[in-house]
Image: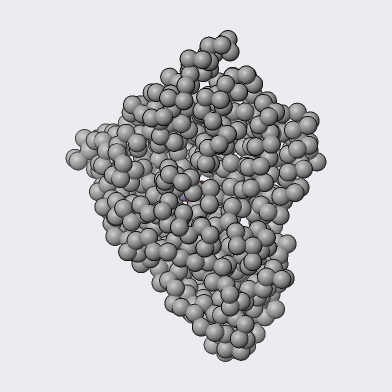
Amino acid sequence: MDPCRRKDTCSSANSWGVVVSHWDWEVAVDFPSKTLTCTATLDIRTLTDGVGSLILDCVGLVVSEVSSRESGESLAYQVKQLDGELTPCLDISLPSTCAKKGAELGVRISYKTDPALCAAVQWLEPSQTMGKKHPYLYTQCQAIHARSMLPCQDTPSVKSTFSAKVAVACELVALMGAERLGSEPHASNPTLTVFSFRQNVPIPSYLAALVVGALESKRIGPRSHVWCEKEMVEKAAWEFEETEKMLSAAEEVVGEYLWGQYDILVLPPSFAYGGMENPCLTFLSPSLLAGDRSLANVIAHELSHSWTGNLVTNENWEEFWMNEGFTTFLERRIAAKVFNEKERHLQASVGWNQMEDAIRSFEKQGKAHYTPLVPELKGLHPDDVFSCIPYEKGSSFLFFLETLLGGPGTLDGFLKAYIAKFRYGTVTTEQWKQFLLEYFHKEVSNGVLEEVEWEKWIREPGMPPLKPMFDTTLADASLALAEKWAAVQDISSTSQFSSDDITNMSSLALQYFLDVLKTKPPLSVQVLEAMEKTYSFNRTENAEIKYRWLRLCLRGRWSASYPLVIELLSKQGRMKYIVPLYRELCECGEEAKAMATATFTANEHFYQMMAAKKISDILKSSGCF
Ligand code: BES
Ligand code: ZN
């Protein structure tokens, strides 16, 4: 039991000595007190001799009893905070029957969650839902919030199957990231329904997911439904109708889909992410309902995680790009199949620009150590280090390797073999690299991999050693138009522009246009006014375009746009949009800062806990409070 062997700096669990192979969860959901009352029974197996305790990650869990399932006897336990660890743990003494390697035991833990500390669960009042009648809750465990709702080995290096029974008020529906086994009336309380679930594919703790609400569904494919409040069902079903096409495209590249169902849940607007790849049930932000399917790449992304992430999982959070970089690469292979290769290149170009922006911004904040593909996380919280860098540097790296090895599709065979080799387990960058070098050994690859600057790509901070050759056909028009706007000196020259400029541009091409403008000196208020008159960005339903546009308006200090910014910040909690907008707003002077503070105060409990913390940190460092 050498503690130095523990690789995951984000977990206190002694998972080198003992692992949870299955967990069974009984949950009673109580909306008035915002608590989950639970019993978790963990099937554990020792990996070495002499393991005296089971150390689980836990945050804010009020434990009332721990016992052995086999003997019924109580097990001594203690909640403590170990030195140098990010969060507390639950230390359970194991009986002497566990002294030998290979011993098995069921450990039963009864506990309640603490609403003030349970970052995994977002509780919504009826007034915060579309139907306004029923309460709602959803969870978000990635990266390390599972421990605030379930005592667990909260490290992706451990995978377990699970079963669950969730009791909720009769008028509500519960779903989990699992196979749905049906529901029945509660045995002793006729006002409750109990929903049963089972996940037979072993998953890491961060993929545990639960949602409860007045949910309805509509079938959108042979293995897919959308789930959401009834007011949104039709719109969502239409928006995500291409799901099966994308699933089939993914299967061509990486092999059979092994999770049975692929359902989609559209959440209320406070959801902090665009999407979350919970197994069998992707969670999506309603901000993706653009009305024209233009944001469907997020579905391609989340379903791709069914292979890269959920089957083959990053060993720890330093290896996050093994999830996100690979998934972004796969997402764009799907775009190439469903749309075309040029579209894939445009997505990659937009991504590259975003990465450059993120790297420069970390550098400015003195956080260049957040920018390597594989950063060191010791002492750091993964939520703080999170950015698009592992996504974009990672997929650019794979794109570069693909080009080196022969062009589009040349990695497909490798990816299939990679998934087959590492599925149901975890992977590190080093293991992937070894497997890649074996697969493309010298005889098949003419030694081209020898020129790869592995260490620069993988370990060094800052921009990658080179930029892959992205085809610019679809980006050129956006670039040219942005250059023209940036060059405007005299406001009368804006008459050269017309709404026709953008009629043939896809939503992504528009994003590219706005991203280029962001790299230029701020546009003046008059130019922004002219742009609004010409293109009506204020009225767009596309959230990606809207937040980029508003960011430009803030940079130009166009105060007429502030109410629109505030409106967006009050209507939705997706961090990708609200974090940069709060940051920019805080740069716009004292009045704007006061608006930012007031908006945050009014919406603090609307945002997810982790998002609220991030924004409060931004406001603090801007001197707002
Ligand atoms: N797994 C991520 C979301 C995530 C990452 C949640 C880290 C918590 C911690 C998900 O797959 C994702 O990347 N979502 C993106 C969508 C995308 C198309 C890049 C998002 O939310 O914007
Ligand atoms: Zn992802």
Identify the image quadrant of residue 350.
top left
Residue 539 visible in the snapshot? yes
Residue 95 vertical position relative to residue 420 in the rendered view, above or below: below
Q: Is residue 7 visible?
A: no
**Which residue is at 64% across, 48% downward?**
571
Quadrant for the N terminus, please: bottom right
The x and y percentages for residue 325 are 43, 44
Considering every residue shown, the one lying at the far right of the view is 625
Instruction: Name the spot of residue 51 as percent of width and height, x first.
Output: 55, 73
Q: Residue at x 76, y 41 (%)?
A: 597
User: Is residue 131 depicted above or below 194 in this figure?
Assistant: above
Q: Position of residue 187 (x, y in %)?
A: 57, 89
Give the total of numbered labels. Answer: 0
In this picture, residue 247 sits left or right of residue 45: left
- Name above or below for residue 353 compared with residue 418: above
Q: Residue shown at 68%/33% (left/top)?
A: 562
Coloring applied to the structure: one colour
Percent position (x, y) of residue 314? 45, 53
What residue is at 58 percent from the left and 56 percent from the top? 268
Choose between 297 and 374: the one closer to the eye.
297
Q: Quadrant of the C terminus?
A: top right
Pick the front one: 101 or 154: 154
Residue 617 drawn above or below residue 362: below
Drawn side of residue 445 relative to residue 473, left or right: left
